């Protein structure tokens, strides 16, 4: 499952969101360092929104141009019926 | 007066689903259409980066001009226990070399040896058929096709989740859906619509975003579904996902039980561990019933020099996967790994002729949403998707002359809009996952999903109906859950049809094993089981399987000419 995105190195390109087949990662407006009432940032950062639905496909990690996404290979949310 | 806002897309051919079947169908429609023909491809994810094809090895069975086409056809029909559309399979095989050349012209590279000959592998359960594999696996395969479609002028729409087919006066005239992130309503008005949304899964295997909802939408729109009693019950491990078991077995991997016995030879004396997937699943279920579980895949016999091949896969996600697992992967993979079989996908799909036209004018099917075969073999999943995608695209174009565009019916769009967004309620809890887990528990049980018996199927039907009842009261707090909820709803409907079909076929064939009817019965059951919605309920009927090219009774293959050694060698 997806573990972590190093946001401090993120350029906000949004590839991780676009390639995610499970709608896990959403780009959302970044907080503004010097808030001014009525302004929101045009800059967006990825948020791991629905981690429990990650299918461990590694797409976000593979296609991240900054190589800052970490997916762990464990697939703990797979069913074990037997 | 309408109470909604949305986006209207007008097109000639609408293709739903961006896996191999949909990608090839869109390409085919564009190639066969006259200048200016509009072709639109929609997918709930990003086309070229999502779907089962993208995460597969994209192995595909190709019949080269020097190969035995009719022999390959015969063994695929026999390997389906007769449950195959012979003309469609033959057309697919006959066309496979031309499609290969076409893919190569797009920049795809298929593995070749030092002399420049294609490297061709045999596949489990088939003797003559040979598989080719593209470099970069399914991600590269899907991406190059996406680029080819962009170049050809196909309109690509990512992240549109289709929620209904538009049916008017007995004809399908497009589809409606929502944007998977914003929920924005979309109407796709089309003269012909090709459903290519894969087989139906229960989020079991690796590609758990596959739900196969299009098949059920087609059923709701009046299409007949076929092969609901058959499933692709794939053995797998909870520890890691692994594409390449077929090759691993050829290199010496074996299935063993808790006592350390390699049990497959007992069940499949001809094929042993190289038997096809449904037969391995059945053997595993019997071993489990006998008390010989847990079962394992033992890869310790794979020679040291071959191991790196499996760890350093050409499929990029697997490469990352094993790299990160590190030592654990080596111990797990080349020791004993617990294995069991789960229903990865039902083979239920839309009934069409060999031309991929459904019974409803304007509606066609491609990929695994088309019921061409009940068993696919490694390499023939995508092989058939390529074949029927090409045919569906051509048929959709031929139909354009007969199917002029119709004016949109505002009342119909309004009701489809309301259905699409119906259970959205900001105050609701996201609860469909709990229902999904209960459904998995029912459908993945070895004595429901693999070893079937009337009383157990009937009990499971009652349980599934109770889940459907629970589902009715659920709502979704956001679009993400709305899509999940609709997929789960579709899976419940699919489970209902699967169990119904399983009850109906009172014999054993292929992946359908009835303990109360253990023998194959060609006299009464050389038929397809077809389901149509009548007064809200599925009506199951038998349809004789035509045998224009080879008999249905053929016993499955002789002992394969190769076992283990030299499996990688050329044709």
Image (spheres, coloured by chain):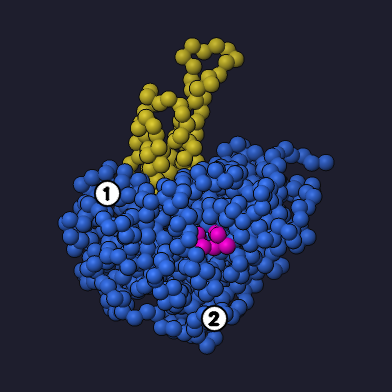
Chain colours: A yellow, B blue
Residue B52 x/y as whole percent: 46, 53
**Residue in view at x 54 percent, y 86 percent:** B524
For this rendering, which residue is in front, B197 or B516? B197
Of all residues shown, which one is farthest toward the bottom? B523
Instruction: Give the side of residue B108 with respect to residue B548, left or right.
Output: left
Q: Is residue B5 above or below residue B510?
A: above
Spatial CA span between label 1 and label 2: 44 Å
Query: The N terminus of chain B appears in which quarter of the rendering?
Result: top right
**Residue in view at x 69 percent, y 39 percent:** B7
- Kindly identify which numbered label has been placed on residue B547: 2
Q: Which residue is mark 1?
A: B312
Extent of the magenta region = B384-391
- Choose the circle earlier in sequence order: 1 or 2: 1
Residue B361 x/y as whole percent: 71, 63
Query: Predominant secondary structure in magenta?
Result: helix
**Residue in view at x 60 percent, y 15 percent:** A38
Residue B224: image quadrant is bottom right
Secondary-structure class at tag 2: loop
Residue B325 x/y as whole percent: 26, 45
Secondary-structure class at tag 1: loop
Instruction: Give the side of residue B369 with respect to residue B317, left or right.
Output: right
- Res. B557 in view: yes
């Amino acid at each position: 499952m997806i573990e972590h995105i190093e946001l401090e190195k993120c350029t906000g390109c949004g590839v991780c969101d676009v390639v995610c087949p499970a709608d896990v990662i959403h780009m959302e407006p970044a907080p503004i360092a010097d808030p001014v009432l009525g302004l929101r940032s045009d800059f967006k950062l990825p948020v791991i929104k629905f981690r429990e639905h990650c299918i461990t496909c590694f797409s976000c990690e593979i296609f991240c141009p900054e190589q800052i996404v970490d997916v762990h290979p464990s697939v703990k949310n797979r069913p074990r019926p037997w | 007066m309408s109470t909604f806002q949305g986006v209207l897309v007008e097109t000639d051919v609408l293709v739903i689903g961006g896996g191999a079947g949909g990608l090839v169908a869109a390409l085919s429609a564009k190639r066969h259409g006259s200048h200016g023909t509009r072709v639109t491809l929609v997918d709930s994810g990003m086309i070229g980066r999502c779907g089962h094809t993208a995460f597969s090895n994209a192995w595909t069975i190709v019949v080269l001009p020097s190969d035995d086409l009719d022999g390959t056809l015969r063994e695929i029909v026999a390997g389906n226990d007769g449950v195959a559309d012979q003309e469609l399979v033959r057309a697919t095989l006959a066309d496979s070399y031309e499609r290969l050349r076409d893919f190569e012209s797009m920049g795809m590279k298929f593995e070749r040896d030092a002399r420049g000959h294609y490297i061709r592998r045999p596949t489990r359960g088939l003797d003559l058929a040979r598989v080719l594999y593209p470099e970069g696996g399914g991600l590269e395969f899907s991406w190059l096709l996406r680029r080819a479609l962009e170049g050809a002028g196909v309109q690509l729409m990512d992240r549109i989740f289709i929620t209904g087919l538009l049916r008017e006066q007995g004809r399908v005239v497009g589809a409606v859906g929502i944007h998977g992130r914003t929920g924005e309503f979309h109407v796709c008005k089309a003269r012909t619509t090709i459903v290519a949304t894969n087989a139906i899964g229960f989020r079991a295997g690796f590609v758990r975003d596959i739900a196969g909802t299009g098949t059920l939408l087609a059923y709701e729109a009046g299409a007949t579904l076929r092969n609901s009693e058959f499933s692709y019950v794939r053995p797998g491990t909870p520890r890691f996902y692994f594409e390449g078991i077929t090759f691993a077995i050829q290199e010496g991997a074996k299935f063993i039980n808790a006592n350390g016995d390699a049990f497959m030879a007992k069940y499949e004396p001809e094929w042993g561990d190289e038997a096809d997937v449904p037969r391995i699943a059945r053997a595993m279920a019997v071993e489990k019933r006998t008390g010989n579980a847990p079962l394992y895949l033992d890869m310790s016999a794979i020679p040291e020099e071959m191991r790196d091949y499996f760890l350093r896969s050409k499929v990029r996600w697997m490469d990352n996967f094993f790299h990160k697992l590190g030592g654990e992967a080596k111990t797990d993979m080349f020791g004993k790994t617990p294995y069991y079989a789960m229903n990865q996908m039902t083979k239920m799909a839309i009934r069409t002729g060999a031309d991929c036209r459904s019974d409803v004018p304007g509606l066609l099917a491609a990929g695994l949403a088309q019921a061409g075969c009940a068993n696919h073999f490694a390499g023939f999943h995508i092989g058939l998707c390529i074949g029927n995608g090409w045919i569906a695209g051509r048929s959709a174009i031929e139909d354009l002359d007969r199917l002029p565009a119709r004016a949109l019916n505002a009342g119909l769009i309004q009701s489809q809009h309301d259905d699409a967004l119906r259970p959205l309620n900001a105050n609701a809890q996201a609860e469909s996952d709990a229902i999904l887990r209960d459904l998995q528990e029912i459908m993945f049980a070895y004595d429901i999903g693999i070893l079937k018996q009337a009383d157990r199927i009937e009990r499971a039907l009652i349980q599934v109906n109770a889940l459907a009842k629970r589902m009715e009261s659920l709502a979704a707090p956001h679009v993400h859950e709305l899509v999940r909820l609709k997929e789960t709803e579709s899976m419940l409907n699919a489970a209902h049809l699967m169990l119904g079909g399983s009850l109906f076929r009172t014999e054993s064939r292929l992946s359908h094993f009835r303990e109360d009817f253990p023998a194959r019965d060609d006299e009464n059951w050389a038929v397809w089981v077809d389901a149509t919605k009548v007064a809200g309920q599925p009506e199951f009927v038998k349809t004789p399987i035509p045998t224009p090219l080879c008999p249905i009774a053929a016993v499955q293959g002789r002992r394969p000419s190769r076992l283990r050694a030299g499996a990688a060698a050329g044709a």
